[in-house]
Amino acid sequence: RQDARAVEGSAARAVAMAGGRTLQGFLLSSLLQGARRSCSGRFICQGREVGSGLQHSLPLGGSHAVWRPWSSAQRLLRHSASSPTRRASSACKCWRRATVRCATSGPASVEPVSLSGLKRQAADLEERLERYIQQVDEQSCCTELDRLETQTTAEGFWNDQKQAQRTLSSISELKATIATVSGFREQYGDIETVIELLEEEVDDGDADLSIDSGNNNELFREAVNSVSELRTRVEKLEMEQLLGGPYDSEGARVTISAGAGGTDAQDWAEMLLRMYSRWGEQRDFKVTLEEESRGEEAGIKSGTLRIEGRRAYGYLKAENGTHRLVRLSPFNAKAARQTSFAGVEVMPLHELDDEYDSMYESIPEGDLEITTMRSSGAGGQNVNKVESAVRMTHKPTGLTVKCMEERSQLMNRARALALLKTKLLLLAQSQKKEKIAELRGDMVRAEWGQQIRNYVFHPYKLVKDVRSGYETSAVDDVLNGSLEDLIFAYLRHLHVTRQQQLDTDDARVDRELSKK
Amino acid sequence: MRSCRALLPMLQPLRPRRLQPPVATRVPGSWACSSGARGWFASCAGATVRPAGSSNNSWWQGQNPQEVMLPLCERKQTAEEVTAAALDTWKQQALAKIYAIGNRFQDMDDGPSAAELKQELDWLLDDATKAQADGTVALRATLGELTDMFIHRRLGNREPFQYVTATAHWLDLVLCVGPGVLCPRPETETLLEIAEKAILDKPHLREGPWADLGTGSGALAIALARTLSRHETSQDTVVYAVECSPQAAAYAHVNIERCAPRQVELVSGNWCSPFLGSDDTAAPQERLVGKLAGLVSNPPYIPKADLAELQREVGEHEPRLALDGGEGDGLDHLRSIFHGAREVLMPGGFIAVETNGQEQCEELLASLQASRDWQEAAIHADLGGVTRFVSAVRSS
């Protein structure tokens, strides 16, 4: 019933959006009215059962299917593509299957109204806490912290400034993690104590915490509040754990370029620039405008923001792609409804250079395998040959170089090493290029059909992330920098997709193994 | 001239000296050796000849006047100039000879293959000729001399290429070699690496003198001296290059003068005898018993039975004295070195030697491990993967 309410809420919103007067709204409302009549709680449309929209336990970020009418533009595209003979029958196929995700995080987000509900939530919270603590691996954190702290007391620690800074930041990070974990444990302990107290009260008959009457009890309300607070904190930290990619903890460089749509697009690009700088400032990141090229009439053709701070790249990588704006254009005399695109490209700040350019500056001896090219024999004093060629293999990459031009073995080795370093540097450069291309993702083509997010101002206000399905109607808030929900929804979606991918991979591997 | 060192009493009594230095000994003053690409004429321009009699350490000069030829790459330009075409013709003739030989040398006794001979020809021409801007070629040896060198001596007689050009490239040094001295081998470069690593790991090895027993051309001694001076050791540290053959010592002297004049002392003797004073003629004024920090050696180690099957370059032309390890397993000289080293090395002193490989190596290691005088006995392989070097530390 709760989920039905949620769905109806969104449907009601849709009706409100449509104003109830357009064809879309009418069709939608009639659809839902028809659906409500069904007693099994499932949406029935056109005689076909449509997904189980009323699942009782909606998983985190779970989805269900809804039938929505095609928009006029989409219908036009579909019908123009089909042949005339199909046109008649396709009139019925005016519905398309769409997924709506619950914007909330599931049944647990609803406030518990009874002690049993509270206990269930507490149990769920404890499970998540345990999972988080396990993932964080407190034990290894402590040992690592001890190790790093002994390192700081070693002499010569401050000789290498960069390394020292890195060690210090690791230490502070580990300390913060350990403090957080112990804080959680304390808080959860408190909650458990409160629940026990409440149970005693119920047993003693002092309080009646059955359904719908628990709200008057102060202690109960306090417990509920602390549970929800702890849960949000854990969620946030779980989210940060999702940011475990190689560059996620770095700062970011955001490049926004106006796409198709002329002055509108340039203005849109400037709006996005403002949005990201506000977001960065709200989160206390250091935001710098690196470069900007203004458009002729208004807005910017392209601009680059440099956002320095922890995990800036991890969050902002959700913004990589094309953003589409639909609004009444202020630059158009007729105030027509215009669509404009802008492309956003997010790259980690500068680690790539450091990582790849200095990767092979000094090659450890163990990585190299050096041999002569002579056939094995007695050698030494038994043989007098002027040739002293050397073959050098770099074991990690498998690159081999030979040198036979020099006249002594040492000179051949030196020459081979120089040659190997050049080859390795070229390899590192190409790897860097590949990495950059990978991070950039598929080319950001700022045009129709490739967008990751739609921002609609007219005729209804909606921001919808196409990848995760998250949508909100608070467009102005979003453009003022409150991107948290959108980002988290995308990161969650990414996590879920990855998990699914891993599961399918595991399943495939199991199948292969079982075949054998 | 430099004043004689305190080592003088160790040497043999001075022989009547020749008034003139041996023919063609041009010692161009002391400078650090480079790889020979130092400028065409620069090395010879300021050549000074050491006046006879000024050197007291000339026990090798008296006996048999050696013609210590300068390396080909450092000789003066000849008067003869040829056109590039003429040189090319000469080269084609030489190549034809090489093709006629083919891989015969290699099949016979594992000598040089045709490819290696072609490489040698290229290097010979690199050393001996230089193309000028106007199409002529400057020569350091006349075409006739080149023919004699390569066609007759190298291909016909199978003299080692190093003797023919009087050059041995070893590490980044250019050394003088010739008949009477062993050409330094590439495997010995690894021996130096082992010694360098020990010097790096154990600082006390930099505090005392080192010695190269059986120095031959002086290669190991010079390289050791360079390593030690790089580590900023005390000024008294010096490398003693011990050599018993006067012919080889002549070359060693020339090379030391060219490459590391103040750091290497050339000493006559048999293995450790100069330091023990057991030689009848040596006055043991400065006995270094128990004071040497390290010893390296590349002694003769080929078993007598194998000497007949060596390639002609080695068997016929290189000095037997430098190759013959004695009857049986060839460990004669190695044994006497370790016998002497027991006395001469300081406690904790380092020794590293080159052996014939595999079995010799293991046998030596076994005897070292069995003895209480040595610790940290270890085997090292050369770049070809053959276990060749044995190192040990004198126990305290």
Image (cartoon, rainbow, N blue to C red):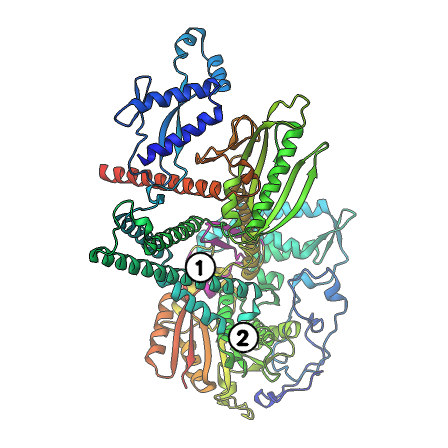
- For the residues labelled 1 and 2, say whether their Cβ atoms are less than 8 Å apart: no
Provide the residue span drawn in magenta: A376-405
Residue A67 place in picture, x, y as percent: 38, 23
Identify the residue position indicated by label 1 in the image. Answer: B384
Does residue A389 belong to the magenta stretch? yes
| B373 and B103: which is toward the camera | B373
Q: Is residue A323 visible?
A: yes
Query: What amino acid type should be assigned to the residue bearing mark 1?
Result: Gly
Q: Is residue A249 above or below residue A10?
A: below
Residue A103 place in picture, x, y as percent: 41, 38
| A138 and B155: which is toward the camera | A138
Q: Determine whether, in the image, residue A485 is placed left or right of residue A204.
A: right
Q: Quadrant of residue B243?
A: bottom right
Query: What amino acid type should be assigned to the residue bearing mark 2?
Result: Thr
Q: Tag 1: Cα neighbours inside 10 Å, few (<14), some, or many (≥20)?
A: some
Spatial separation of the CA atoms under disc 1 and disc 2: 24 Å
Identify the residue position indicated by label 2 in the image. Answer: B215
